[in-house]
Amino acid sequence: MDHVLDLAGIFVFALSGALVGVRRRLDVVGMAVLAEMTALGGGILRDLILNVRPAAFSSVGYVVVPVAATVIVFFWHPHVERVMPAVNVLDAAGLGLFCAVGTEKALDFGLSPLHAALLGVITGVGGGMLRDILSGQIPNLLYDRQLYAVPALLGSAAMAALYTLDLHGWPATLAAAVLAFGLRVAAVRLRLRAPLARGLTAE
């Protein structure tokens, strides 16, 4: 079940990466690179920090799913754009799942709750950060006006707290993922924004 959820999250992140490629007028190769980086980048960064073989290289599915997402966007990107509100909900679910799983894996490797939570955030937003850098945009992690990293941070912190209380396994992971998911969806629906420095106004 965990593997299926992983692939579902990877697919949604890959769709968003490929769509950025369309918007930046990249060719199919550029679209595929953005899709792969968005979907797998966070997990690869996490595993490299943990000094283990990246999970992305343990199964063919981790590579094939982003390619499939690229093909879908390549041929039907106008239709994908139209259903983006639904894709954004799934993206929020993927964010919650990845930050919770990333935090738990870091804790399993002996990191402190603080460092594990930070690594959980990297797992959740790292792929999007790489996508933005490669496509020439300011990463959401640095310009979080849509509250993307904040839900990931709170979800990761919740996972670390539950783990510290000796609450492990899928119920704890699901609870932390649902928290991050709910906060992200609420931020989108209510148009919540992180504050700018005093005296600055949004462009």
Image (cartoon, rainbow, N blue to C red):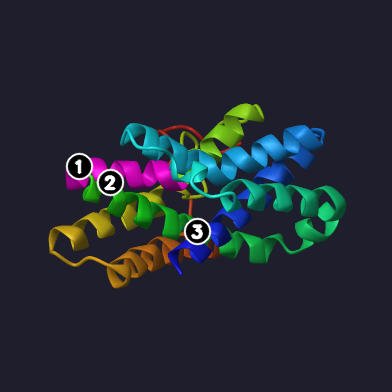
**What residue is shown at x 13% (from left), y 63% (from top)?**
165
Q: Identify the image quadrant of residue 43.
A: top left
Q: 193 or 168: nearer the eye?
A: 168
- Taking 153 as reference, is 24 above or below it? above
> Magenta span has 119?
yes
Disc number at residue 94?
none
Q: Which residue is mark 3?
A: 6
The reply to whether dot 2 and dot 1 touch (C-beta < 8 Å) is yes
Q: Position of residue 146 (x, y in %)?
A: 52, 49
Answer few, some or many: residues within 10 Å of disc 2's Cα (few below 14, many 20 plus, some between 14 and 19): many
Q: Quadrant of the C terminus?
A: top right
**Is residue 61 shown left or right of residue 42?**
right
Q: Is residue 44 in sight in this rendering? A: yes
Residue 123 within the magenta-colored segment of the rendering: yes
In the rendered structure, which segment of residues is drawn in magenta?
110-124
Give, as a three-letter code, the residue at label 3. Asp
Question: Which residue is denoted by mark 2 in the rendering?
Answer: 106
Q: Is residue 88 above or below residue 132?
A: below
User: In terms of secondary structure, where does tag 2 sit?
Assistant: helix
